[in-house]
Amino acid sequence: MTAKSIKQAALALFAESGYEGVSLSEIAKSVGIKTPSIYAHFESKEQLFLELLEDAVHEESDKFVQLLAGMADQPPRERFYAAFRFLTDLDGLSKGQSFLKRTMLMPPRNLEDRLRTAFIAYEHVFTVPMLRLLHECAGPGGFGDEQAERLLALFYALADGLLVEHKLYDIELYRRRQSLVWSCLQDALRLALPDGKE
């Protein structure tokens, strides 16, 4: 239970203040233990942080897979929109999701290389079903693998941009930007299809 309590406290603190902004002594104080007691469960702050990141990645990935599985009978464009909303509706995130988004925006300098590997693996969970979904949106004879990859790159770039904008703007402006970005994605899908195909 102590390890779980340490992780819960650390997650909340890291989500709020980031890796550099939190000390092990703060985590220990939040749990109500002495700092050396943390080392009975975690060898370092780095190990604790990376375990929390792994947990957060699994949580977000599982939620995404469940979302698409629950919509399997819906039209491809509806599922594509749901995927867009999953990545860009950023209010009401769990602590784990908030921690993950903060880490993506501001990765700790000393962990950047290790996090890059983790984030590539995390993205792959989204890439495989998203590419399949893009091909479904196009239908038979729609577009090839390269075109789908280009559209997915656009999708990721826009979703990442909205993540930054969510931190900068009030909710009303953010929702307008989110809606405009979705319109751009729909236009990109239409333009990617051969003439006359919808």
Image (cartoon, rainbow, N blue to C red):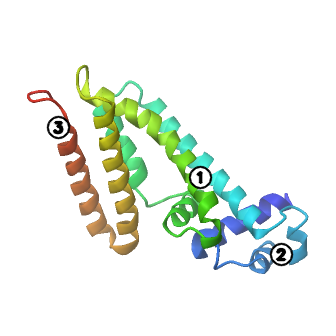
177 up-or-down from 135: above or below: below
Mark closer to the chain start, 2 or 1:
2
The answer to the question of whether label 3 and label 1 lie on touching residues, with beta carbons closer than 8 A, is no
**Residue 194 placement (x, y as % from top left):** 14, 29
The earlier-in-sequence mark between 2 and 3 is 2
Q: Eyeballing the image, is 84 above or below 110?
A: above
Between residue 136 and residue 95, name the one nearer to us.
Answer: 136
Task: Decide: few, some or many residues near mark 2? Use Cα within 10 Å; few <14, some 14-19, many ≥20.
Answer: few
Residue 1 spot, x, y in % from top left: 85, 57
Q: Which residue is mark 1?
A: 117
Find residue 198 and report its horizontal and vertical position in percent.
15, 29
* Residue pointed to by mark 2: 32
Contact (CB < 8 A) between labels 2 and 3? Answer: no
25 shown above or below 183: below
- Local secondary structure at mark 2: loop
**Residue beneath label 3, please?**
190
Rendered residue at 20%/44% (across/down): 188
